[in-house]
Image (cartoon, rainbow, N blue to C red):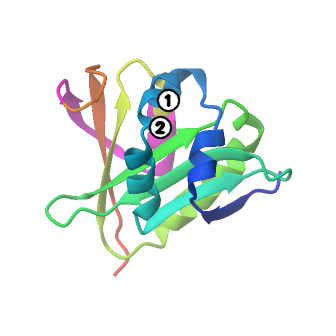
Amino acid sequence: MPITFISLQDHHLTSLSLQPAQCHISLFLADDAYRQWLIEQPISYAVLDHHADVIACIGIIEQADKPNFAWALISNQAGKYFLAIHRQIRTFFKNMLSTQIETYVEHHFAAGHRWMRMLGFKPSGICSDIHPCGVDVINYTYQSSIN
């Protein structure tokens, strides 16, 4: 299935119908300042299906004093496009200059853990105090090796 990555805009975030495992994030997406902050990140995209419907919003938050942080908000309609999304993101990560990227996945979200391993992330520990909703998360690290 064809997909398109385009620069993230506010209406992409507000029109995204999140998958059940991420529905609680809707509370944060209701905040105009939070959405604007995500949009202003240099690496932030909306993923559109062949009907131009938003099926994911993704990005990397660049941090000067810490490793960059990857994020992804996935639509409940993204399933049939998952392989195409995965391949594009994996290629993007493989082509990055040498860098370290971190992310986390809620402890109970098996599909998220599977996806991180498929993308080449390695689990790096469990944390109980970083998720905005207070749930335990597994931290993951990706190390690009292109020089």
Circles 1 and 2, Cβ within 8 Å, touching? The answer is: yes
Q: Label 1 is placed on what type of residue? A: Ser
Q: Position of residue 53 (x, y in %)?
A: 77, 47
Q: Which mark is residue 26?
A: 1
Packing grade of label 1 (10 A; few <14, some 14-19, many >=20) is: some
Regarding mark 1 in the picture, which secondary structure is present there? Answer: helix
Extreme residue in the left direction:
65
Residue at the image point whose x is 66% and y is 62% from the top: 5
Q: Position of residue 102 (x, y in %)?
A: 30, 50
Q: Position of residue 121 (x, y in %)?
A: 38, 47
Which corner quadrant holds the C terminus? bottom left
Q: In the figure, 100 relative to 128: above or below?
A: below
Q: How many marks?
A: 2
Direction from residue 107 to residue 94 in the image, left or right: right
Q: Look at the image and give the residue range highlighted in magenta.
A: 113-129
Residue at the image point whose x is 70% and y is 46% from the top: 54
- Queried whether the magenta region covers residue 127, the answer comes back as yes
- Queried whether the magenta region covers residue 124, the answer comes back as yes
Task: Give the image quarter of residue 13.
Answer: top right
Extreme residue in the bottom direction:
147
Q: Position of residue 80 (x, y in %)?
A: 77, 38
Q: Label 2 is placed on what type of residue? A: Leu
Q: In the figure, 98 relative to 45: above or below?
A: below
Q: How far apart are the two marked residues, 1 and 2, measured between alpha carbons?
A: 5 Å
Regarding mark 2 in the picture, which secondary structure is present there? Answer: helix
Query: Which residue is denoted by mark 2 in the rendering?
Result: 29
Direction from residue 41 to residue 44 in the image, left or right: right
Direction from residue 51 to residue 55 in the image, left or right: left
Packing grade of label 2 (10 A; few <14, some 14-19, many >=20) is: some
